[in-house]
Amino acid sequence: MFKNYVRKRLEKYVVRYFQAHPDVKLICVAGSVGKTSTKTAIATVLSQQYRVRMHDGNHNTEMSVPLAILGIEYPKNIQNPFAWTKVFRAAKRRIKQPSDADIIVQELGTDKPGDIPAFGRYLQPDVGVITAITPEHMQSFGTIDAVASEELSLGNFSKVVVINRDDIEGRFAQLLNNPNIDTYGTSGAAEYSFVDEDFTIEDGHRGYFTNPEFANNLHATLKVLGEHNVRPVVGAVAAAIRFGMAPEAIIRGVEMIRPVPGRMNMLHGANSSMIIDDTYNSSPAAARMALQTLINLPAPQHIAILGSMNELGSASAAEHEQIGRMCHPDQIDWVITIGEEAAKYLAPAAQANGCVVKSFADAISAGSYIHQFIEPGAIVLAKGSEGGIFVEEAIKVILHSIDDNEKLVRQTPEWLEAKAQFFSRF
């Protein structure tokens, strides 16, 4: 009862904020994967010409979204009515103050059907960006069609919707009733795309953006790893052009984009190896793209550390097996799994292909084991989910320098304490 009261008041404050500041524009980002990378890319590019407000964390739920939009910190003690009284006062002040942003970029998350449509009660984004439709929270959604209906609902309460043409099946277009649709991607099928002319680990992707607006294509070098991480940058370009940004400002912005911690971030590992840190979370689509990136990179040794993918429900066995079948001994020298689901389903599929596989219950043991086998110049992919997997702790064991620990995800004192309790079980 109290939670509903707080939520409704926060939503009213957001409505009043936009009424008081009609010139402030709102971009919302939804999708099964890639939301944070896309949100960050959009904010980075737009900030070259506009004042942009974006919450760095994942404040994307019904209670946290209004606060993130208003630029107010989430209270630590949410059960304390006095804490919310302070929040309400801060919201009133925010409404009365001159705006400190031209554009607000906000991520919208979902755990169950109805979460995304509920944002439409009080939000009307100027641009809604939808990054992907892939299996997520399948114990709640059940089918991929239900996921699509949920995520694409953002497009139906946005003024303009920009969708990832490569990671959203065309058959789901019937779920959109908004005629103002733009598409982005890397396959060339989208209106906004990136043509990759050259790639090196040191320099990134060199190429150009195609678009309907500019006669000359936008040439740039992108400091990200993997085709699936180029797509958020293309989405940012599409949004920037929508907001009338100058070509030179767009190019300057995209060349400033760097990987978000835990999302295909390159780190120096033991024995002159390179680590692809993709440990923030894992889903079937993201795991497939990360593995393909590992396979495509030239190196004397390829190692894949793969944690269980959570929240897949009845699809868990099939999805883990599919990832295991992607692993072949002529492409991946070691497959290391972490967690029960990966050991039960992914590991046998990789072994059936002839891969050398070793399974562990915890990430620290996995990192300690593989440390002894890393060859000079190796590339190690670390991929895993948050809850009970924590593959970033395997990376700690194989980093070249402990100074890079701070570049990993979930390193706040609160997270470290929670993980210490978790790993004490092993």
Image (cartoon, rainbow, N blue to C red):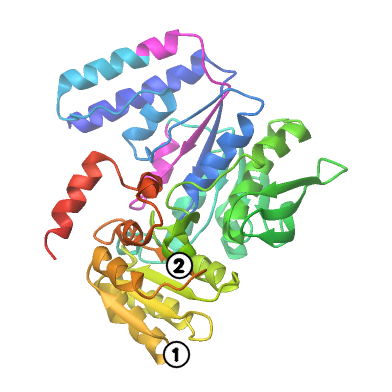
Nearer to me, 153 or 415: 415
User: What's the residue type where badge 1 is placed?
Assistant: Asn
Q: In the rendering, at what x and y percent does residue 383 appear?
A: 40, 63
Residue 336 position by quadrant = bottom left
Judged left or right of residue 426, residue 182 is right
Please say whether residue 155 is visible from this viewpoint. Answer: no
Q: Is residue 105 magenta?
A: yes
Q: Which residue is mark 2?
A: 380
Q: Is residue 360 magenta?
A: no
Q: Secondary structure at mark 1?
A: loop
Judged left or right of residue 240, residue 81 is left
Residue 412 position by quadrant = top left
Q: Nearer the viewer, mark 1 or mark 2?
A: 2
Marks 1 and 2, how far apart at CA: 20 Å
**Residue at the spot 55% in from the left edge and 71% down from the top edge:** 292
Please state the extent of the stretch shown in magenta in the rendering. Answer: 92-121
Q: In the rendering, at what x and y percent does residue 426 appear?
A: 14, 66
**Residue at the spot 31% in from the left edge and 66% down from the top edge:** 367
Tell me, for residue 370, which label it has, or none: none
Task: Confirm or deny contact between disc 1 and disc 2 (CB under 8 A).
Answer: no
